[in-house]
């Protein structure tokens, strides 16, 4: 991944905008992705909201395998970090080829709830898989596609896990230790330092409304300052 110019040669033929939402569990990614989609559609942009792992029927089936909640003391076979990352990349290949690339080629705005930074943070930083290998695998499955802009919603781990409990959302990752989640957060912080032009760190302790305003303003900056984009735009919705 390049740190200075996020637009690769391949991406120059794509006229849309690719925006990703990243962060630890319960940090507000899905909420903000939805709010931004609503706001952009109201301005007349054509927007696709999607998520990882998932985004196509096959990739959503892989998601179910990945997130199935298995009890730590149960008899379920545990998933190895290597298997977990291969499934994530398999799902991403389907997602990029069938949803993200075609939408960007049509000049749409693609909002994706998690993407490659999550793979580096969870599988690289937290599970200690080789980061250089993960970057090479990413290149292989996406053909070099990178987000124009990434929002990293940063929230203390316990706040996010408490939000998830309140929302009664639980999956396999909720059984991970606090130190695992802290390594994930440190991973996102390291990535933010490494790719400061692409990744915007946002204090996710703010209200959903304040976050949405900040995110909308940064997005409009990218859209209006990137003259090489060819976004499709219709009349704003009343
Ligand atoms: N800024 C906020 N302040 C307080 N609560 C919030 C905020 N944003 C979202 N929430 C609530 O926290 C919970 C988790 O939010 P959300 O599902 O958007 O997070 P997420 O990052 O997508 O979580 P996950 O990692 O589970 O996918 C939801 O119940 C949501 O209503
Ligand atoms: Mg979510």
Image (cartoon, grey):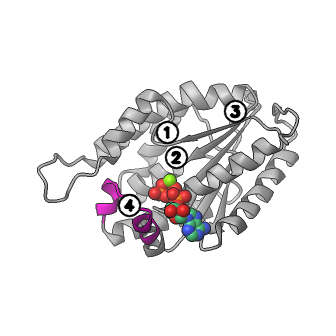
Quadrant of the rendered structure where residue 82 is?
Answer: top left
Task: From this view, report whether residue 123 is shown above or below residue 226.
Answer: below
Which region is colored magenta? Answer: 161-176
Q: Which residue is mark 2?
A: 116
Point out the tag, 3 or 4, that comes first from the N-terminus: 3
Quadrant of the rendered structure where residue 105 is?
Answer: top right
Q: Which residue is mark 3?
A: 11
Element at label 4: helix
Question: Left of 175 or right of it: where is 137?
Answer: right
Mark 2 and mark 1 in contact (Cβ < 8 Å)?
yes
Point out the tag, 3 or 2, that comes first from the N-terminus: 3
| Residue 80 spot, x, y in % from top left | 25, 47
Taking the spot 48% from the left edge, 66% from the top edge, the residue there is: 185
Q: CA distance from mark 1 to mark 3?
A: 15 Å
Taking the spot 76% from the left edge, 49% from the top edge, the residue there is: 39
Q: CA distance from mark 3 to mark 2?
A: 16 Å
Q: Main secondary structure of the magenta part?
A: helix
- Give 218 or 168, whichever is nearer the viewer: 168
- Residue 27 shows in this picture: no
Q: Which residue is mark 4?
A: 126
Point out the tag, 4 or 1, that comes first from the N-terminus: 4
Q: Is residue 169 magenta?
A: yes
- Give 191 or 29, whichever is nearer the viewer: 29
Q: CA distance from mark 3 to mark 4?
A: 30 Å
Q: Which residue is mark 1?
A: 138
**Disc 2 crowd, CA 10 A, few/some/many (<14, 14-19, 20+):** many
Mark 4 and mark 3 in contact (Cβ < 8 Å)?
no
Element at label 1: helix
Taking the spot 69% from the left edge, 32% from the top edge, the residue there is: 11
| Residue 62 spot, x, y in % from top left | 36, 35
- Residue 185 shows in this picture: yes
């Amino acid at each position: 991944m390049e740190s200075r110019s996020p637009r690769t040669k391949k991406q120059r033929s794509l006229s849309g905008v690719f925006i990703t939402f990243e962060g630890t569990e319960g940090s507000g990614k899905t909420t903000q992705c939805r709010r931004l989609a609503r706001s952009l559609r109201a301005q007349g942009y054509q927007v696709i909201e999607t998520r990882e792992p998932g985004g196509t029927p096959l990739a959503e089936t892989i998601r179910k395998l990945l997130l199935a909640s298995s009890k730590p003391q149960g008899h379920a076979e545990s998933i190895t970090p290597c298997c977990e990352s291969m499934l994530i990349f398999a799902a991403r290949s389907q997602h990029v080829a069938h949803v993200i690339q075609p939408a960007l080629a049509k000049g749409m705005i693609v909002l994706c709830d998690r993407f490659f930074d999550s793979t580096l943070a969870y599988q690289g930083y937290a599970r200690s898989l080789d980061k250089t290998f993960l970057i090479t695998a990413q290149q292989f499955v996406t053909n070099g596609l990178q987000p124009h802009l990434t929002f990293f919603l940063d929230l203390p781990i316990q706040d996010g896990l408490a939000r998830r409990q309140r929302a009664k959302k639980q999956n396999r990752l909720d059984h991970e230790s606090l130190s695992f989640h802290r390594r994930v957060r440190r991973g996102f912080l390291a990535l933010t330092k490494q790719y400061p032009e692409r990744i915007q760190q946002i204090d996710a302790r703010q209200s959903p409304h304040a976050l949405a305003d900040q995110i909308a303003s940064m997005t409009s900056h990218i859209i209006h300052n990137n003259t090489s984009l060819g976004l499709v735009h219709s009349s704003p919705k009343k």
